[in-house]
Image: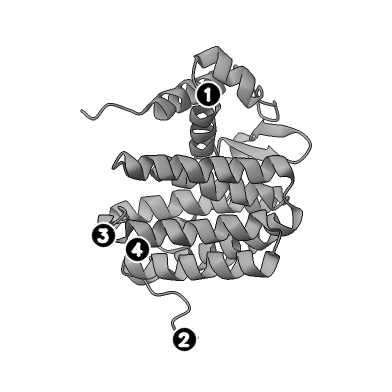
Amino acid sequence: MKTKTLSQQIGDFLKREIRSGAFNPGDRLPPETELAKKYGVSRTVIREALATLKNDGLIASQQGRGIIVLESVSRQTFRVSDVFESISRSEVNHVYEVRAILESEAAALAAQRGEEEDVARIVSAFEAMERAVLRHEHGSEAHLAFNQAIAEASGNPALSSLLSFLYGQLKTFAKKIRLDTLQDPCRTDTVRSEHRGVVDAIRSGDPEAARKAARTHLKNASERVGLRIWEKE
């Protein structure tokens, strides 16, 4: 059995606490620094664990309040699987295209609205992805944290929650149709350069450049996994 990463273990601990009633719907989770101290790990590990919980629909970011535990009903409100009774590559393409549209706009809003702390989280997540590449790891958790940090920097909690949901749906669909989303070692430098372009545009506060960089990356990323979005452009 494959050993779980530290962030996965922390995520499991937090899920158990939420489901046991230690945190009720609407409750605010402790700050990252407090959680890091409680579990004896770095804030990066905590961020990755929280990103997974957001992906599972257990928590969400709310501007001015922090990380909030969601109402159980909100976790069951909508499922893409309700839209598509059977899963095919073309249907995954549709969902991926929705994600790409939202994510490129999130990058633009992050460049426009992101505070210094928001940008720091984006950079931190990007650096975590860089370290994963150097260690020849997949880095999927760091990648998820990177995407979520950009969504949160948009200043729109509804957009952030919707993107978290779509990330989870795409992950499920990928397994069902055996869509290989593992990073191709031969394309590592290209992928890193695309991500860096998004980061640089957000740091410079250029919404149009951020939108374009994210759009280019997402279009290229779709092609790398055998999908084609915006193909009629």
Q: Give the residue type that dot 2 points to.
A: Lys
CB atoms at circles 2 and 4 under 8 Å apart?
Answer: no
Q: Residue furthest right?
A: 64
Q: Earlier in the sequence, mark 1 or mark 2?
A: 1
Q: Earlier in the sequence, mark 4 or mark 1?
A: 1
Observer able to see residue 55: no
Q: Which element is circle 4 on?
A: loop
Observer able to see residue 49: yes
Q: Earlier in the sequence, mark 1 or mark 3?
A: 1
Q: Is residue 175 left or right of residue 219?
A: left
Relative height, residue 46 to residue 187 (above, below): above
On residue 232, the disc is 2
Q: Give the residue type that dot 4 points to.
A: Ser
Q: Tell me which corner region of the image, top left, top right, bottom left or bottom right, holds residue 209.
A: bottom right
Q: Give the residue type that dot 3 points to.
A: Cys
Disc 3/disc 4 C-alpha distance (Å): 33 Å
On residue 186, the disc is 3
Residue 36 screen position, x and y as percent: 56, 20
Q: Nearer the viewer, mark 2 or mark 4?
A: 2
For disc 1, the marked residue is: 19
Relative height, residue 137 to residue 180 (above, below): above
Disc 3/disc 2 C-alpha distance (Å): 28 Å
